[in-house]
Image: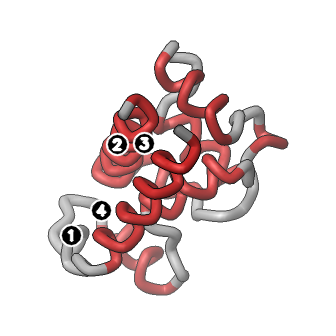
């Protein structure tokens, strides 16, 4: 099962990098857009993968299957991961107000969960 999850994450990473225009259209405030352009923003799929690898354990986000289980039981959600990334100085605090970014993180978490069940 671990190989399925890792294989799925690899496929997810490859598919996400082959579609660069996904976040081109956004209804975010100009300040968030400017922040995104001026800083190297971590894409939502990268953020989920970082959480899966344990980058946010110090902020209370479990890694690997613990992350999937916590997500399944409603103990961790997309906003928790985004907040942890802000606390770890991985992304700017303005992203907490970017619902499209948080929704994308949630979608990738859901994909991760579905890969783990396969």
Picture residue at 76% right of the left edge, 33% below the top: 60
Q: In this rendering, would 109 be left or right of 73?
A: left
Q: CA distance from mark 3 to mark 2?
A: 4 Å
**First in sequence: mark 1 vs mark 2:** 1
Kindly report which numbered mark, 4 or 3, lies closer to the viewer in this rendering: 3
Question: What residue did someone put label 4 on?
Answer: 29
Q: Badge 4: how crowded within 10 Å, few (<14), some, or many (20+)?
A: few
Kindly report which numbered mark, 1 or 3, lies closer to the viewer in this rendering: 3
In the rendered image, residue 11, in percent from the top left (x then y), is placed at 37, 64
Quarter of the image that includes the C terminus: top left
Chosen colour scheme: secondary structure
Q: Mark 1 near mark 3, Cβ–Cβ under 8 Å?
A: no
Q: CA distance from mark 1 to mark 4?
A: 18 Å
Q: Badge 2: how crowded within 10 Å, few (<14), some, or many (20+)?
A: some
Report the disc number at residue 22: 1
Instruction: Compare residues 88 and 72 and report the one nearer the observer.
Output: 72
């Amino acid at each position: 099962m671990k190989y399925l999850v890792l294989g799925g994450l690899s496929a997810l990473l490859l598919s996400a990098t082959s579609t660069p225009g996904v976040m081109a259209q956004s209804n975010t405030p100009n300040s968030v857009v400017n922040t995104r352009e001026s800083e190297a923003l971590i894409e939502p799929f990268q953020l989920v993968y970082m959480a899966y690898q344990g980058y946010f354990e110090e902020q209370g986000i479990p890694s690997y299957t613990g992350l999937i289980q916590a997500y399944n039981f409603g103990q961790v959600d997309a906003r928790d991961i985004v907040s942890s990334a802000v606390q770890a100085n991985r992304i700017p605090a303005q992203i907490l107000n970017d619902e499209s970014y948080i929704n994308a993180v949630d979608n990738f978490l859901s994909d991760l969960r579905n890969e783990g069940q396969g």
